[in-house]
Image (cartoon, helix red, strand yellow):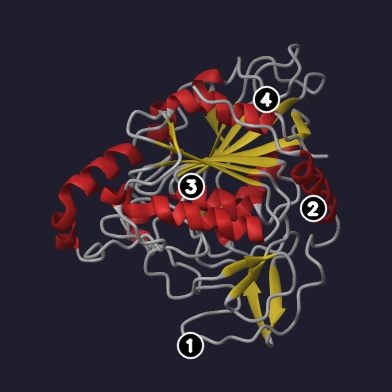
Amino acid sequence: MQTVPRLAPALLLSTLMLGFVAGCEGGGDSPPPAEIAVTRKACTPFGDPPRRVEPLLDTLFAASCTGGGGRGLENWTDAEGNPRQACLYQPEAASTDHKLPLVIYLHPSLVGVDITLALSNIRSQLDTADLSGDPQRPGFLLLAPYGRVTARYYPFPDNFLGPGWDNWYRQLQPGVESRRVNGEDYPQNVDAATIDHYLQKVLASGLVDERRIYVMGWSNGSAMGLLYSLNRPQVAAAALYTAPDPLAAFDDPCAQTPVAATPKDDTELQLFNPGVPIYHVHNACDIAGICPNGLRLEQRLIAAGTPFQGQIIDNQKLATDRCDALCGTDPNGVPAGLLDPLGYVQNLPGYLLGTLNHVTWPRDWTEEMFRFLREHPKR
């Protein structure tokens, strides 16, 4: 079992300085501009247009919030008129005199909260995990919002079947319902707004140690978790599993480069919490060849000033330092033929092994994820 290394002193200093900046107004080098040149016809200043819900399919999915002390929070209607849900799992020890860390968990696409929490060992440690560093305060609260069924820039069958998250429309400036850019109003990403809504509901209970608001996620949930964490100064740290790059993966026509300052045009996206520490565990052989995409993601975020630690694991879930070429080498995560459903047969061994790895939570690494979160409270 590998231990997550501590940040080097220089990187730690950088983290503290960036975290201070992110805690101030906006978190970037300058206020968001009212003009962002759009150089691509299909795009907005914030990437793709919002992904619209598939109403008939969306009605087929809902969270039961069963198991582990879960309960459904009150349904909420987002700005697009979509009914939204979230589950809250709360240890018995939680009280206003015994505040606990909060983990926001974002589920993968295709499958929702109930199945994936049952397959991982996150919820089972609700009463015992150490996320506070205080032996008198074991456990954590777990908030699990539910996604929507929308069209996604993912390969079949993950392009629209089942609930997920819109990490392609990237207007996530904190604290605003919309931004006026180029004379047009761009509303807040409704998935981010939904997470905000339920987070505020939980914070209002007085049960949360607000220095320890963390994000965890899986697959598309990790991509959304990255985007959310990088734009919300209240998030202390994130620990994620097998995330495609939320700003550039597969056939996304409006890919963007993350930056901490004013974007030059629509090909860049300003981050509002660039100093948030990120820990990303991903497979050497992963579905759709996203291991090299994860390596490029790491480079791009480090260049934007994010303290990022990536850990590749092999088919036995042991640490390794390289991707498996059998499962894809394209840093955009698009092996030959992948966008054609019949293209999977061109490399069936790689696709099957990558899929198996992708849908298996790395249970032996959960403690390392918890350790990373515990060691990175909000300063």
**In this picture, residue 346 sits left or right of residue 130:** left
Q: Is residue 95 left or right of residue 294?
A: right
> What residue appears at the point 69 percent right and 28 percent down from the top-left corner?
374
For the residue labelled by badge 3, is the local secondary structure a helix, a strand or a loop?
helix
Image location of residue 1, percent across then percent down: 49, 22
Type of amino acid at the residue the image marks with label 1? Lys
Q: Nearer the viewer, mark 2 or mark 4?
A: 2
Q: Residues within 10 Å of mark 3 (few under 14, many from 20)?
A: many
Q: Is residue 336 above or below residue 365?
A: below
Q: Say which residue appears at 63% left-offset and 69% top-offset.
A: 269
CA–CA distance between discs 3 and 2? 25 Å
**Front: mark 3 or 2:** 2
Pointer 3: what residue? 221
Q: Earlier in the sequence, mark 1 or mark 2?
A: 2
Q: Earlier in the sequence, mark 3 or mark 1?
A: 1
For the point 32% across and 38% down, which residue is it? 357
Say above or below: 299 vs 214: below
Q: Secondary structure at mark 2?
A: helix
**Callout 3–callout 2 Cβ contact below 8 Å:** no
Sequence order check: which comes first, mark 3 or mark 4?
4
Question: Which residue carries the number 1 mark?
Answer: 41
| Label 3 close to label 1 by CB (< 8 Å) | no
Residue position marked by numbered label 4 in the rendering: 131
Question: Disc 1, disc 4: CB below 8 Å?
Answer: no
Mark positioned earlier in the residue sequence (2 or 4): 2
Q: Position of residue 158 (x, y in %)?
A: 31, 55
**Which residue is the site of mark 2?**
18
Q: Nearer the viewer, residue 140 or 94?
A: 140
